[in-house]
Image (cartoon, rainbow, N blue to C red):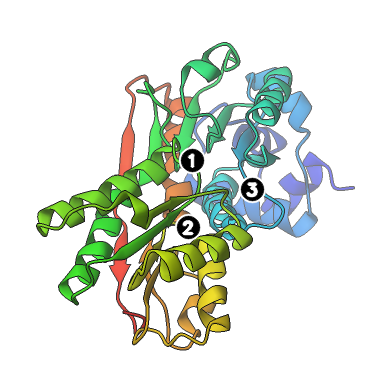
Amino acid sequence: MASIKDVARVANVSTATVSHVINETRYVSEETKLKVFQAMKELDYKPNLIAKSLRSRKSMIIGLIVPMQYADTSNFFFMSIANGIEKIVKEKGYNLILGNSHENIETEMEQIKLFNSQLIDGLIIAPAADHYSQYEEHLTGDYPVVFIDRKPKDFSGDLVMADSHQGTFDAIHSLVQKGHKRIGFITGYLGISTSDDRLTAYKRAYMQNNLTVDPLLMAEGPPSFDEGYRLAEKLIKERKATAIFAANNVMTMGALSFINESNLKVPEDIAVIGFDDYDWMRITNPPLSVVQQPSFEMGEHAVRILLDKIDNKIIEEEQVILPTKYVSRQSV
């Protein structure tokens, strides 16, 4: 295994300089840092993170907790967030540890306790709980925390999320402009801020177009493929919806499955708009109109805020709302 002396020899610097670069204990020019990092990469040198953390009181480890489920395409969304986080983490010399709450509050609290027992420098969470009071007794570690994607009630700390409201409003408004008055709204469980924002936008679009909101056109259920299928069937067959807006990607897939099996033509028989934008949505027949949200950028913003807290001891809280975008294709 390579040693710090080997790194110093390859980079043509002293071992003290290599130590200062690794531990950030003294100013080193960017040119010299680059030489040291290149030498470390060439030699596959891994610093002793435990020893380093004892010296600097930093572990160079960031924790991330996301609510991924086994059979849910939202995994793509949260892994895109994780990729955005990891990109910045690697650039700054940190390591990322991923935890999964499986959308279960008890599991999430166990994950937080586990991170509390370890030496991490900061934590990023996409919360499963709907109220911040559920976190207060558990987030007791001496590290900053940034929430992503969802905002628990009564939370005023650091947060990065997408503007689900505007993208949804633009999508529903576009359907109304095309003559649709019976727009079915399919959503996962309400109580999560993103789901609530999308429903509020749906109602607002109706009211601003002088249409009456029909509660029977709004359908809530577990965020799953099967439930998307079932709710689409109900809204189209029983409620006579002429358009479907599915507020998450896995229920979009279920709704499209029912529409295809029923030999309904899109958009002639039923218009469809989904949420998120993956490759499969562009190659459906016809290509699917969607609301895009910047998942990768959400991760980047969240970790930058976190590292500012860690490295610069910034106290002021920051809440970033990134724009979403309605993308019209041939399904409306």
Q: CA distance from mark 2 to mark 3?
A: 13 Å
Residue that badge 1 annotates:
303
Q: Which mark is residue 248?
A: 2
Is label 2 in a helix, a strand or a loop? loop
Residue sitting nearer the eye, 136 or 178: 178
**Residue 254: quarter of image:** bottom right
Q: Earlier in the sequence, mark 1 or mark 2?
A: 2
Q: Which mark is residue 68?
A: 3
Is label 3 in a helix, a strand or a loop? loop
Q: Amino acid at mark 2?
A: Asn
**Residue 325: quarter of image:** bottom left
Q: Amino acid at mark 3?
A: Met
Q: CA distance from mark 1 to mark 2?
A: 25 Å
Residue at 64% across / 48% down in the picture?
68
| Dot 3 alpha-carbon crowd within 10 angstroms: few under 14, some 14 to 19, many 20 or more | many
Where residue 311 sits in the image (x, y, percent)? 48, 28
**Residue 41: quarter of image:** bottom right
| Dot 1 alpha-carbon crowd within 10 angstroms: few under 14, some 14 to 19, many 20 or more | many
Is label 1 in a helix, a strand or a loop? helix
Residue at 45% across / 43% down in the picture?
149
| Viewer-nearest of discs 2 and 3 | 2
Where residue 78 sits in the image (x, y, percent)? 56, 52
Q: Is residue 189 above or below residue 231?
A: above
Q: Is residue 293 visible?
A: no
Q: CA distance from mark 1 to mark 3?
A: 19 Å
